[in-house]
Amino acid sequence: MSHQDELARADRFAFGENWARFLASVDENRIATAEESLRSMLGVSSLAGKSFVDVGSGSGLFSLAARRLGATVTSFDYDPASVACTAELKRRYFPGDVQWTVREGSVLDPVFLATIGRFDIVYSWGVLHHTGRMWEALANVRSLVKPDGLLFIAIYNDQGRASRYWHAVKKLYNRTPPPLRFTVLAPAFVRLWGPTFARGLLRGRPFKVWQNYASDRGMSPWRDVVDWVGGYPFEVAKPEEIFEFFRRAGFDLRRMKTCGGGLGCNEFVFLLKASPDAPQT
């Protein structure tokens, strides 16, 4: 399936449209939080002198964070609306900057990937499981990492039956006419946030978690709900599957942050050894 055919799929979520609405909430606090997220997981204080590629840049928030940390940044996304979002953040904060390149392209297109080279840091948070060919996408990002470079990815956790339930919800949402999608989104919102609001109500602060939500990655709770419910295609993996997949290709696991077996993403930072024990497969 070609890049244009992928864009035309009726059951694929319009991620770029969701990110365009998120841009209105991007402020200094969200940017600083995104920067801290990168510093913490990568174990660095600065990215000065490093090349950084944002695979599936979405809103562009983390491309902006990497650039502010000193990296030379390449951002790309298959969705033109997401490319426009990233370009807009570049225009706002780094107009005319030659050390930040924004492009349209697919992680499933090896010809495109060959044109952008290899990088000290390859970043793809919550993207590759939405390609419809997750394991192929995971294999393709390996080719973007320089020897002794880092790969930082986040992949949806495999919850077994619960993941199959959410797969059906997401498929239904995208096949429902847009004016009626609230009939899927509303009950899903209650399922996702209802228990949290109930616990907060018992403590006298029902909205505390909602108000503090951006403290982890600088994201918007409502936009993340829409992204979660609509995010289709949808694939999942167990942490050990991701670990073994990259270990066989000569990557060492340097840091891992799981969602405790529940709903959400497991995060991984791998180092590509300069002299891998085994060839990439």
Image (cartoon, rainbow, N blue to C red):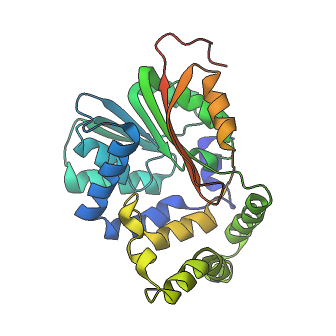
Which quadrant of the figure contains the C terminus? top right
Residue placed at 64% from the left, 36% from the top?
242
Q: How many marks?
A: 0
* The quadrant where residue 245 appears: top right
Residue placed at 30% from the left, 43% from the top?
66
Where residue 207 appears, as percent x and y from the top left, is: 44, 83
Which quadrant of the figure contains the N terminus? top right
Where residue 142 appears, as percent x and y from the top left, is: 54, 27
Q: Is residue 111 visible?
A: no
Is 125 on the left or on the right of 98, as rendered? right
Q: Is residue 212 visible?
A: yes
Front-lying residue, 60 or 10 = 60
Position of residue 216 relative to residue 102, above or below, is below
In this view, the residue farthest toward the front is: 203
Where residue 263 appears, as percent x and y from the top left, is: 63, 60
Front-lying residue, 271 or 224 = 271
Position of residue 203 relative to residue 261, above or below, is below
* The quadrant where residue 138 appears: top right
Front-lying residue, 269 or 107 = 269
Where residue 261 appears, as percent x and y from the top left, is: 66, 54
Residue placed at 60% from the left, 52% from the top?
7
Residue placed at 50% from the left, 10% from the top?
275
Front-lying residue, 146 or 270 = 270
Is 28 on the left or on the right of 158, as rendered? left
Is 135 on the left or on the right of 82, as rendered? right
